[in-house]
Amino acid sequence: MQIISVKFISWDNAYDFLSQDERGNDLDLKIGEMVLVETVVGTDIAEVIKIRKLDFKNEDENSNSVQKRIKIKPIIRVASEEDLENLRKNNLNNNKLIRETRKLAKRHDLEMKISDVHMSYDNTMMVFSFIADGRVDFRELVKSLSWKYKKKIRLFQIGVRDEAKFFGDIGDCGRGLCCRRFLNDLESITTSFARDQQVSHRGLDKLSGVCGRLKCCLAYEEKVYQEKLQGMPQVGDTIKTKDGPGIVIDLNPLKRTAKIRLRADNSIIKKEYN
């Protein structure tokens, strides 16, 4: 038996289900497949994004006892073409719903941007994503939406990086955004990454992606740079050399060398770190 992680919408959280149907039959699922599942708020279609094994402490346990113990629901079935078409029809008017909801949010004086909406497979729930600088009290907006559309309403706050991941674009490298193509988890990227890789002098305009945040690709080689920087000084440090004290003015972590301006005569020397 396996645990199947799924996402109903690309900007939503991932949720876990068992790799079985309601009758207890094992399902041979693949990443990217669409499945029909029952949630606490209704029935919906989700995409399989991750598959991992479930470790049994007792191999004699049957599937029913496993489900009861770990409290994870099974999958109803693999979504059919008809299921997918029904979901598509439910979401045909999403652009209109977004425009109407933006007007409602403005009427409630809420500083938020509605970016997307998802209508569930069973047509009973609407999930809206929005961007805001801080926390937003949207309780009155939820009441208005519930009264207007006669459905369950959920609002989900996302960041600008999540918005870029959803809508997609082309990066400076000329390829599709990494977050759109394969990055499921967007880790925190800090300015220390740019300092470690000696690119902070390029400025935020060059180091920022289409989302306005630091580029995710700064994380790809960060571990290597951290290892290479072990035992090396930082730019601005005063260190002793065989030619006298000096100030570190530049580093090359990959070659493990530092440029040092000597205090005595302002000449520049190179120091190697083995």
Image (spheres, rainbow, N blue to C red):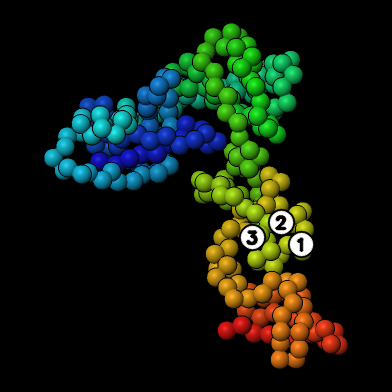
User: Up-down: is 209 above or below 14?
Assistant: below
**Dot 3 alpha-carbon crowd within 10 angstroms: few under 14, some 14 to 19, many 20 or more:** many
Q: CA distance from mark 2 to mark 1?
A: 7 Å
Residue at screen point 54% across, 18% down? 153
* Viewer-side residue, 202 vs 188: 188
Q: Residue furthest right?
A: 265
Residue 20 position, x and y percent, is 27, 34
Horizontally, residue 19 falls left or right of residue 262, namely left
Kindly identify the amino acid type of the residue bearing the numbered disc 2.
Leu
CA distance for labels 2 and 3: 11 Å
246 and 191: which is toward the camera: 246
Q: Quadrant of the N terminus?
A: top left
Residue type at mark 1 is Arg
How many numbered tags mark residues here?
Answer: 3
Q: Position of residue 213 (x, y in %)?
A: 68, 48
Mark number for residue 193? 3
Q: CA distance from mark 3 to mark 1?
A: 13 Å
Tell me which numbered mark, 2 or 3, is placed earlier along the sequence: 3
Disc 2 designates what residue? Answer: 207
The residue nearer to you, when weighing 117 against 135, is 135
In the picture as drawn, the residue positioned furthest to the bottom comes out as 242
Q: Amino acid at mark 3?
A: Phe
Residue drawn at x 64%, y 20% as measured from the top left = 138
Task: Quickly name the residue at label 1.
Answer: 202
Residue at 51% over, 49% down: 182
Q: Position of residue 16 (x, y in %)?
A: 38, 35
Tag on residue 54?
Answer: none
Whether 209 is drawn above or below 61: the answer is below
